[in-house]
Image (cartoon, rainbow, N blue to C red):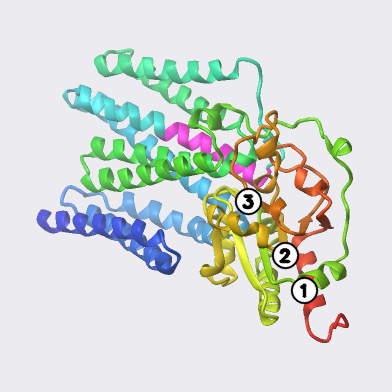
Amino acid sequence: MNLYLIELAYLLATALFIFSLHWMSDPKSARRGVFAGVAAMLVGVLATWAKPDILHHWWISIPILLAILPGVWLSLVPLTAVPQRTALSHAFGGLAAGLVGTAKYFYWFGHEQDMLTPFRMVAIIAEIILGYLTFTGSLIAAGKLQEVKWIPQRPWTYQGQIFVNLGAFALALLLGVLLIFMPDRAFSPVLFVLIILLSLNFGWMLVMPIGGADMPTVISILNSYAGLSAVAMGFVLDNKLLITAGALDGSSGLILSIIMCKAMNRSFFNVLFGAFGQVQQSKAGEQGQYKAETTEGAAQILEQSSLVVIVPGYGMAVAQAQHKIRELYDQLKKRGITVKFAIHPVAGRMPGHMNVLLAEAEIPYTDLVEMDEINPDMPQCDVCLVVGANDVVNPAARSDKSSPIYGMPIIDADRARQVFAIKRSKNPGFAGIDNELYFLDKTFMLFGDAKAVVGELVKQLTPGSGMH
């Protein structure tokens, strides 16, 4: 293909990537944004493949064919597994960048040592460090989200861990600096391999101390790392589209991470090294006892309400209760009851997790309200129905300075006139602390699987059920 046509294709792909990000920022145009992103990637791959210097087409075709079945399998995972599937995508992206950087270095070292300029070496070092730490870090994140038995869900910490982690990273950077100025010495490949090992080790050490409550932010940060490794790969391969696409990916992940850290009132350093999620001594005995309610009683109160606010959380995702939630929404709307969904920025296990699930159930996006917008209306809320959410509605974030979530903005469920909380068990959430909301006089628990409990509420509200 003519080089000018390839450059035009790259320009088109860049424009599509930008439009994709823009459209995905609004639920009304999100689907269009997904298609634009897919089209941009397809254009970029085909244009690169059409370059005149690409000669060994089978080396490209065979991996593509081998990847089809795993790709189809990954596309069919249930929505509850989307967070870990997203983490796996970041792992594959980081591994690809690391392998490309490794292949380029050893090829140039063996055949064209004059190509190992300081600029290219800086790009290669950045590529392999970011790529390989993203690979192992994302694998651990996926394992935690999948609740793999041999990967602890709670933060895995030990004394002096921060210094060990930072020391490993600093050593990788130091070896990288040495390699930049001595890329072609006989011992340089040994330094290169040591940097790879340190990066792989640092990736899993970085994520192991982080609890599930921080996973949305961690996934976003790993997304940013994967994008930055793609930028470095673009410089190594002299590919403008990779640089642009990686920069868009890295910057959007960084911006999202900042937004989520702000939503939790925490810094990057605290997320990465604060071990949020340590189990604390239960205070349930000091605060009181849970008060259980039947679905019949809860349905009667819901039916008499004017405004119902539903707070979805990870428990809804695990139970795959979003479609039953839609049925409940329909039953309440038929009675002229206003129903809103309060969305916390870090609810669930990935950015936008609740939005994705509720969109699948075709809940009108106009009834999905962000935390800052819904909180002023909570004192007028007749019933707040908490479906599998925990830390994001815990009043301890406002009042208990000793709590690990102190200062984190929450949805003000405790300011509603009455609260029903659907919960599988009496165990604490991922932050490892009891929820003060559950011990208030106005709060009643509906214990059980969220899908089953909401299904019972729907049955009670359905005409002819015997409740009317």
Alpha carbon distance from label 1 to label 2: 9 Å
* Residue 134 colored in magenta in the image: yes
> Which numbered tag is attached to residue 245?
none
The residue stretch that appears in magenta: 131-147
Q: Nearer the viewer, mark 1 or mark 3?
A: 1
Q: Residue at x 68, y 66 (%)?
A: 308
Q: In the picture provided, is 455 more to the left or to the right than 178? A: right
> Which numbered tag is attached to residue 411?
3
Sort mark 2 into few (<14), some (14-19) or many (20+) by Cα contacts within 10 Å: many
Alpha carbon distance from label 3 to label 2: 15 Å
Residue topped by disc 2: 382
Q: To which quarter of the image does residue 21 belong? A: bottom left
Q: Main secondary structure of the magenta part?
A: helix
> Which numbered tag is attached to residue 304?
1
Q: Residue at x 79, y 66 (%)?
A: 452
Which secondary structure, mark 3?
loop
Spot occupied by residue 117 in the image (x, y as percentages of width and height): 19, 23
